Amino acid sequence: METKILNYRIIIEPDKRIGTGEHGYAAYCPTLGLSDGGDTIEEAIENMKKLITFHIESLIEEKQPIPLDKEEEIIVTTKIRIPNHGKLSFA
Protein backbone atom coordinates (compact mmCIF):
# COMPACT_ATOMS: atom_id res chain seq x y z
CA MET A 1 0.00 0.00 0.00
CA GLU A 2 1.34 3.42 -0.99
CA THR A 3 1.52 6.11 1.68
CA LYS A 4 0.60 9.72 0.89
CA ILE A 5 1.81 12.61 3.02
CA LEU A 6 -0.64 15.51 3.36
CA ASN A 7 0.20 18.89 4.89
CA TYR A 8 -2.36 20.99 6.74
CA ARG A 9 -1.96 24.35 8.45
CA ILE A 10 -2.85 24.45 12.12
CA ILE A 11 -3.41 27.81 13.79
CA ILE A 12 -2.89 27.87 17.55
CA GLU A 13 -4.10 30.60 19.88
CA PRO A 14 -3.98 31.00 23.65
CA ASP A 15 -7.38 30.17 25.09
CA LYS A 16 -8.97 30.99 28.44
CA ARG A 17 -11.46 28.27 29.28
CA ILE A 18 -14.93 29.51 30.04
CA GLY A 19 -16.12 28.77 33.55
CA THR A 20 -12.79 27.57 34.92
CA GLY A 21 -10.50 30.48 34.12
CA GLU A 22 -7.78 27.96 33.23
CA HIS A 23 -5.54 28.70 30.28
CA GLY A 24 -4.91 26.36 27.39
CA TYR A 25 -4.58 26.50 23.61
CA ALA A 26 -7.18 26.39 20.85
CA ALA A 27 -6.11 24.86 17.54
CA TYR A 28 -7.80 25.27 14.16
CA CYS A 29 -7.37 23.65 10.77
CA PRO A 30 -9.07 26.15 8.42
CA THR A 31 -8.88 23.94 5.32
CA LEU A 32 -10.85 21.13 6.97
CA GLY A 33 -12.96 23.28 9.29
CA LEU A 34 -11.74 21.39 12.37
CA SER A 35 -10.85 22.62 15.83
CA ASP A 36 -9.57 21.11 19.07
CA GLY A 37 -7.30 22.21 21.86
CA GLY A 38 -5.01 21.24 24.68
CA ASP A 39 -3.36 22.34 27.89
CA THR A 40 -0.07 22.94 26.03
CA ILE A 41 0.85 23.85 22.46
CA GLU A 42 2.27 20.36 21.95
CA GLU A 43 -0.93 18.73 23.23
CA ALA A 44 -3.08 20.95 20.99
CA ILE A 45 -0.98 19.95 17.94
CA GLU A 46 -1.12 16.25 18.84
CA ASN A 47 -4.89 16.42 19.34
CA MET A 48 -5.28 18.14 15.96
CA LYS A 49 -3.14 15.50 14.23
CA LYS A 50 -5.40 12.78 15.62
CA LEU A 51 -8.55 14.68 14.62
CA ILE A 52 -7.25 15.39 11.11
CA THR A 53 -6.26 11.73 10.63
CA PHE A 54 -9.70 10.56 11.80
CA HIS A 55 -11.43 13.10 9.54
CA ILE A 56 -9.39 12.15 6.44
CA GLU A 57 -9.92 8.42 7.09
CA SER A 58 -13.67 9.07 7.39
CA LEU A 59 -13.69 10.97 4.09
CA ILE A 60 -11.85 8.10 2.39
CA GLU A 61 -14.27 5.54 3.84
CA GLU A 62 -17.24 7.60 2.63
CA LYS A 63 -15.58 8.07 -0.78
CA GLN A 64 -15.65 11.86 -0.39
CA PRO A 65 -13.05 14.25 -1.85
CA ILE A 66 -10.17 15.22 0.43
CA PRO A 67 -9.57 18.98 0.70
CA LEU A 68 -5.93 19.98 0.37
CA ASP A 69 -4.13 23.04 1.70
CA LYS A 70 -2.75 25.46 -0.86
CA GLU A 71 0.92 24.60 -0.53
CA GLU A 72 2.04 27.70 -2.40
CA GLU A 73 0.89 29.91 0.49
CA ILE A 74 3.45 31.07 3.00
CA ILE A 75 2.16 32.16 6.40
CA VAL A 76 4.42 34.05 8.76
CA THR A 77 4.11 36.39 11.70
CA THR A 78 6.22 39.41 12.35
CA LYS A 79 6.77 41.79 15.24
CA ILE A 80 7.01 45.52 14.75
CA ARG A 81 7.97 48.27 17.15
CA ILE A 82 6.01 51.48 17.24
CA PRO A 83 6.54 54.44 19.54
CA ASN A 84 3.98 54.61 22.34
CA HIS A 85 2.84 58.19 22.76
CA GLY A 86 0.24 57.21 25.34
CA LYS A 87 -2.56 57.58 22.80
CA LEU A 88 -2.65 54.05 21.39
CA SER A 89 -5.74 51.92 21.66
CA PHE A 90 -5.80 48.24 20.70
CA ALA A 91 -8.76 46.00 20.04
Image (cartoon, rainbow, N blue to C red):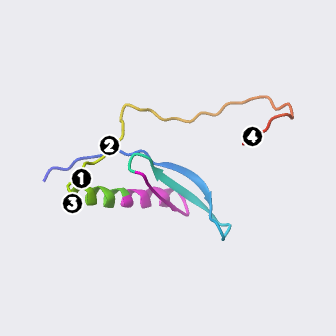
Mark 3–mark 2 Cα distance, whole angstroms, equals 17 Å
Give yes or no for contact between labels 4 and 1 (Cβ–Cβ under 8 Å): no
Write down the residue under mark 2: 68
For residue 39: magenta?
A: yes
Quarter-wise, where is residue 31 in the image?
Answer: top left
State how many labels appear: 4
Residue 57: image x %, image y %? 26, 59
Q: Residue at coordinates 48% horizontally, 52% vertically from top-left?
A: 28
Left or right: residue 63 compared with residue 34: left
Q: Which mark is residue 4?
A: none
Which quarter of the rendering shows the N terminus? bottom left
Q: Residue at coordinates 86% horizontally, 35% vertically from top-left?
A: 86
Give yes or no for contact between labels 3 and 2 (Cβ–Cβ under 8 Å): no
Residue 71: image x %, image y %? 35, 35
Mark 3–mark 4 Cα distance, whole angstroms, equals 47 Å
Q: Residue at coordinates 51% horizontally, 60% vertically from top-left?
A: 37
Residue 10: image x %, image y %? 45, 48
What amino acid is labelled 4 in the image? Phe
Q: Residues within 10 Å of mark 1 (few under 14, many from 20)?
A: few
What amino acid is labelled 1 in the image? Gln
**If you read the primary sequence from the N terminus, does the residue marked by circle 3 or circle 4 appear first?**
3
**Residue range (magenta):** 33-51
What amino acid is labelled 2 in the image? Leu
Write down the residue under mark 3: 61
